[in-house]
Image (cartoon, rainbow, N blue to C red):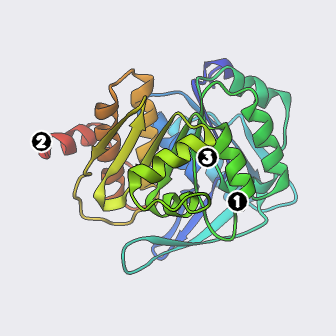
Amino acid sequence: MENENTQNVVCFGEVLWDILPTGAVPGGAPMNVTYHLHKLNKIPALITSIGDDEKGKELTRIFEDFGVNTDFFQIDKEHETGKVYANPNENNEVVYDIVKPVAWDFISWNNALGDLVAHSDYFIFGSLASRNEVSRNTLFELLESAKYKVLDINLRAPHFNQKIVEELMSKADFLKINEAELELISNWSSNFTQLKDRSNAIMEKYHIPNMVVTLGAEGATLFRDGKDYHHNGYKVDVKDTVGSGDSFLAALISKWMDKAQPADALRYASALGALIASKTGGCPVYDVSEIDDLIKKNE
């Protein structure tokens, strides 16, 4: 494994098994983001916790086979490895039943985690991992030492509350949010109905410099450095949308690490998000060349 200080991006939160109608596949937004960052030739590490069970061992083996750092997988002797029952509805959107409590609810603080995050360029986290006090306290501790904080909002009722979500947003340098979450959060403090107005209101209230709103089949809108950019997305035959938004975020961050222009990063992220939606599960096998092929095919 690489020395911990070489990890240029760190993800925090849940790893689990998505129990789909077609079978069980590895999942959890932080796991998916980590997988795609590694595919895009970045050096990610994932802070999480798994059960002392066969499902946890299997997740570790999968990550090691990917070539991803598993040094920061904690082993929980008391709680099982996370699992989610995921079923697509009539619109191809996935409805989740997230089991609790599980191992990733109990990610415990230690100084090695603080050092890891302090030496990385990006720290990516979500709101779901804050549902339990143990992981939540560790997360807020890590946010104190993170250089650039990327919040991937993941509002899954009943696993969130407004106060904690607002605290997390106030820490973020960049926010990723979907259209439904944008409507919900903007309604906490404003009556705006337009996407741009809602987005600006959230950025202003929580002092978030940059954000992106994913719009499913309608693409995504990026607000960065006082400008806004939109991409209409790419049309594909959708297998399922599991992990599509996570791959989108990984591609966006990857391109920023490469100093790409905002519009170019958004186009690339949109292409990877569409590509993953055309495959099954959040961490499917693919070749990075397929991203460029999809872009070229639609030029």
According to the picture, the residue beneath numbered tag 3 turns out to be 61
From the top left corner, tell me how far across and down residue 247 is, in percent.
43, 46
Expressed as whole percent of the image width and height from the top left, the position of residue 59 reads 62, 51
Q: Nearer the viewer, mark 1 or mark 2?
A: 1
Q: Residue at x 57, y 37 (%)?
A: 208
Q: Position of residue 40 (x, y in %)?
A: 41, 33
Occupied quadrant, residue 58: bottom right
- Residue 64 vertical position relative to residue 8 in the rendered view, above or below: below
Whichever of labels 3 and 1 marks the residue nearer the N terminus, that label is 3
CA–CA distance in space, label 3 to label 2: 39 Å
Bin the neighbour count of mark 1 within 10 Å (Cα to Cα): few under 14, some 14-19, many 20 and up.
few
> Callout 3: few (<14), some (14-19), or many (20+) C-alpha neighbours within 10 Å?
some
Secondary structure of the residue carrying tag 1 is: helix
Disc 3, SS: helix
- Quarter of the picture containing the C terminus is top left
Q: What residue would you read off at disc 1?
A: 162
Per the image, the residue denoted by label 2 is 299
Query: Of marks 1 and 2, which one's residue comes earlier in the chain?
Result: 1
Q: Of circles 3 and 2, which is in front?
A: 2
Judge from the rendering whether residue 208 lies leftward or rightward of residue 81; answer left or right.
left
Residue beneath the point at 67% across and 41% down: 170
Residue at 28 percent of width and 40 percent of height: 267
Given the image, on which type of amino acid does mark 2 rest? Glu
